[in-house]
Image (cartoon, helix red, strand yellow):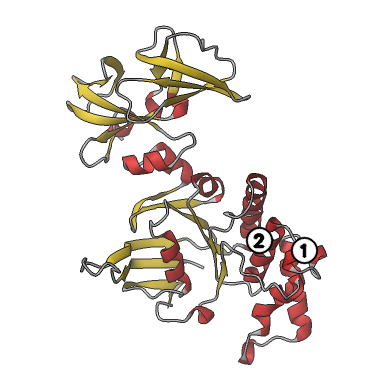
Amino acid sequence: MKVVLQNLTKRYPNRNKKIREDVIAVNGFSFEIPSGKLIGLLGPSGCGKSTTLNLICGLETPTSGRIFFGDDDVTDLPPEHRGVGLVFQNYALYPHLTVRQNILFPLQNLKGDKKLSKEVMEQKALEAARLVQIEQLMERKPSEMSGGQQQRVAIARALVKMPRVLLLDEPLSNLDARLRLQTREEIRRIQRETGITTVFVTHDQEEAMSISDMIVVMKDGTVQQIGAPQTVYDDPTNLFVAKFLGTPAINVFEGEVKGGMLYIGEDAVLDVSPVSDQKVWVGVRPEGFVLSGEGKLHCAMRSVEVMGRDKSVVCAHPAMAVENIRAILSSEAQPDPHAETVCFDLKPQKVHLFHRENEQRIPFGEKAEG
């Protein structure tokens, strides 16, 4: 099921009576979600991602704009008539009901020609339970289950009606790290098996990038960038997107372009022709550093962290705009943790330039030519 959002805007009255302007939670959001894809809505708290989800499912009414499921305009339809499945952060299971009864509940509320026989409902509930691999837990109550198992029940309940669109609002936030990894893999598997168009809301960029076909990065109610996860990571449209995606975060420096050469402080580090002379923000991904005794970027050594598969060099530079610089090197690299200075060359494809004023990306090299 294709989902189309046309110039979607949601305003709320400002609770501060001294400020007359409304609070804009979602501002002019336009996007076509392809049928059968998993889309990650990503951004910091308060960016409007959950409000967007609530607009899609009908829990909120847009101030302006339209919502289409396929060719159907569902903007004014109540949630129960949209054919959506919604999974909340807190699971919202009925504590006095068993797993079977929780999953059956949406089917038992069907009316008219949609009403199902008891046998059909039982069959659908069992199929949904098998899909999330909890069929052996059908007679348990939520209090007798782990957080990960409860989350699977919530997903099964959302899937049992085979909704046109599945909406997941921070579904992994209450799980520990190992369960988060396992459950997000399960969500991806289930989405692929069912082919249901799915919107996944999270503030965790690693989650969004690992399972989404496309991600939508939001800030202050406005879409910053839409694209395949790797594309957005490699080609961020602005400094906010570059800083938000990536673990560890991108390293940011104050820089200047002079005569086609990029300077970070006094260090001439990279040819960035044909960028004109100007002051810039320089973003270098942690994997963009190459350890070299003759390296052009000279940093003060702070520590070396051995991570097993790689090493993390924590260092400093007078022009850095972050607390520390973190360079990720292969485990074979041999940085001297006792040295005063560590030198690097930079991988051009891992270096991003941004305008100092508006923080928009400045292409250079092959990207400028393209």
Res. 63 image quadrant: bottom left
Q: Is residue 109 left or right of residue 324?
A: right
Q: Which tag, 2 or 1, sits closer to the chain's start?
A: 1
Task: Please provide percent x and percent y for residue 133.
Answer: 75, 60
Look at the image and tell me in which quarter the C terminus lies: top left
Question: Which amino acid does the dot numbered 1 rest on?
Answer: Glu
Task: Please provide percent x and percent y for residue 61.
Answer: 38, 76
Asked if the residues shown at circle 2 and circle 1 are in contact, with their CB atoms under 8 angstroms apart, the answer is no
Residue designated by label 1: 144
Question: Which amino acid does the dot numbered 2 rest on?
Answer: Gln
Looking at the image, which residue is at 44% across and 35% down? 249
Q: Which mark is residue 151?
A: 2
Q: Is residue 228 left or right of residue 86?
A: left
Classed neighbour count for the residue bearing mark 1: other residues with Cα under 10 Å, few (<14), some (14–19), many (≥20):
few
Q: Is residue 344 left or right of residue 148?
A: left
Which of 20/333 is in front?
20
Tell me the distance, in whole angstroms, between the alpha carbons under discs 2 and 1. 13 Å
Classed neighbour count for the residue bearing mark 2: other residues with Cα under 10 Å, few (<14), some (14–19), many (≥20):
many
